[in-house]
Amino acid sequence: MKRKIIILDTTLRDGEQALKYSLTAKKKLKIALSLENMGVDIIEVGFPISSPEDFKSSQIISNNITNSTICSLARCVDNDIEVAAESMLKAKNFRLHIFLATSDIHIKSKLKKRFQEIIDMSVFYVKKAKKYTNDVQFSCEDAGRTNINNLCKIVEKVIEAGANTINIPDTVGFTVPYEFGKIIKYLYNNVPNIDKANISVHCHNDLGMASGNSISAIKEGASQVEGTTNGLGERAGNTALEEIIMAIKLHGNLLNAYTDINIKNIYKNSKLVSKICHVPIPRNKAVIGSNAFSHSSGIHQDGMLKNRNNYEIFNPTIIGFKKTKLNLTSRSGRSAIKQKMLELGYKEKDYDLNKLYNKFINFADKKGKVFDYDLEYLAFKNEKEYKNFFLLKKYSVNYKLRDYTKLKIKLLCGDKIKNIKITTKKNIINVLCKLFSKTTMLKIVLLNYESFTTEKIENLSIRVNISVKYKNRTFYGTGISKNYLESYILSLIDVLNNIWNLNDIYMNLKKNIF
């Protein structure tokens, strides 16, 4: 019979420690509700003694969460435990999570105590925590570097004192999976009352081993995994829970385990956390990165088109992710081009695949990534026929007006000059997009923009990439200048030219193609 693995999400506590700014109670509640909706068993909401805002957050979340257990952190200090318990009094279910360092280096250099004193303190404060709730978790801080026999002693004693869950953290991300798995196995074989508590693991990613260590621990009997959404956390971060959840989903038989997580909400939750915390999800992030289900190699693309299982271990839509993406690059083959043209509504008789492929390869070598509208253009026109219908002739900006930005732009549209004038307090980026849309009569909606700087400081340039929606299709533009605002204006003009040239194709194509 498979074991249920309890999922404890500590994004709001450990994950927040990695952010530039603390999250407000309102933002924390949004994340907590998302975690509850995803089916997370336990939500660690903060460290209430640390600040009034953390206490307030714990109270508000406790009042609004009904399905997940609420958990707060406390040191082995009287006031810590009392304040943590007070913050969760209105929670339907709550857990007190207390911790104390157990490794020699922490005991001697940080706490300046003897190991027996650590045992005595741990037992005392577990008993104190039990006065407030039956659900008490004790963490052996830096367990990964704790003498294994000492670890067994303290685990036995705190279970005897009433701790329901014992957390074994790899606090500094020091261990490797084989080693960490052995620690868990040793505890199960040498602590006589181990069956009276759940064994939890909390791994950090300093060596990139957090997920591997957590999976090894599950294999050896651990019944709870702690981590964060998107792997947020101190230093290199924590175990990324989306990785653990999907690993258990795909290898449930091997691990003899399952979770109660609603995996359809994984991607939605990841995006929400990323947005609220202002921490972008890395493109190559496992499970949820934008490149995790993108394929560029022609061999991979061909294999994917024949059977997605050739190069995808699960369908991204099951976690709420967008569908698989075939990137068009110089490494793409004919099969990917043919498929993309089919998706765009063209049959093989509408164009010459060999000619298109040859033009595509030359274009891709120069541009890098090729978009679907580039492919359409290459299919029916030559690259040299591309027109820069819109051109920036002149612009000036004044930031000195109180709270206002004043901007004047001369835009060449074919053979006509259009004057664009802006005086606004609002986000100049959004205002510019709307005015360019109105001026050119191309109804675009801004989706996203991002800026990058060159590495050479003495010759600094700013590159702005934007994406817009036009007639239910996404178009991209790039602008490069030494001035950020000019780079953005140029990126807008670039995207408008891409749309103009594609419209030019449509007007000249035979109607029966469509």
Image: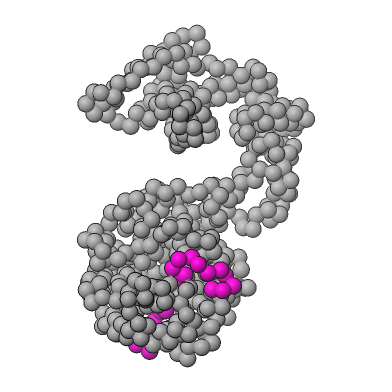
Q: Residue at x 24, y 61 (%)?
A: 51
Q: Is residue 96 visible?
A: no
223 with respect to 63 (left or right): right
Q: Is residue 75 visible?
A: yes
Q: Position of residue 131 (x, y in %)?
A: 26, 83
Does residue 353 sit above or below 84 in this rendering? above
Q: Position of residue 128 (x, y in %)?
A: 26, 82
Q: Residue at x 53, y 33 (%)?
A: 473
Residue range of the region highlighted in magenta in the rendering:
160-180
Q: How many marks?
A: 0
494 with respect to 88 (left or right): right
> In front: 261, or 23?
23
Can you name the residue that lies furthest to the bottom here?
A: 192
Q: Residue at x 52, y 84 (%)?
A: 188
Q: Position of residue 182 (x, y in %)?
A: 56, 78
> In front: 339, or 288?
288
Does residue 378 sit above or below 223 in this rendering? above
Can you name the residue that lies furthest to the right here?
A: 354
Does residue 179 sit above or below 321 in this rendering? below
> In front: 80, or 428?
80
Q: Position of residue 187 (x, y in %)?
A: 50, 83
Quadrant location, the C terminus: top right
Q: Is residue 313 magenta?
A: no
Quadrant location of residue 367?
top right
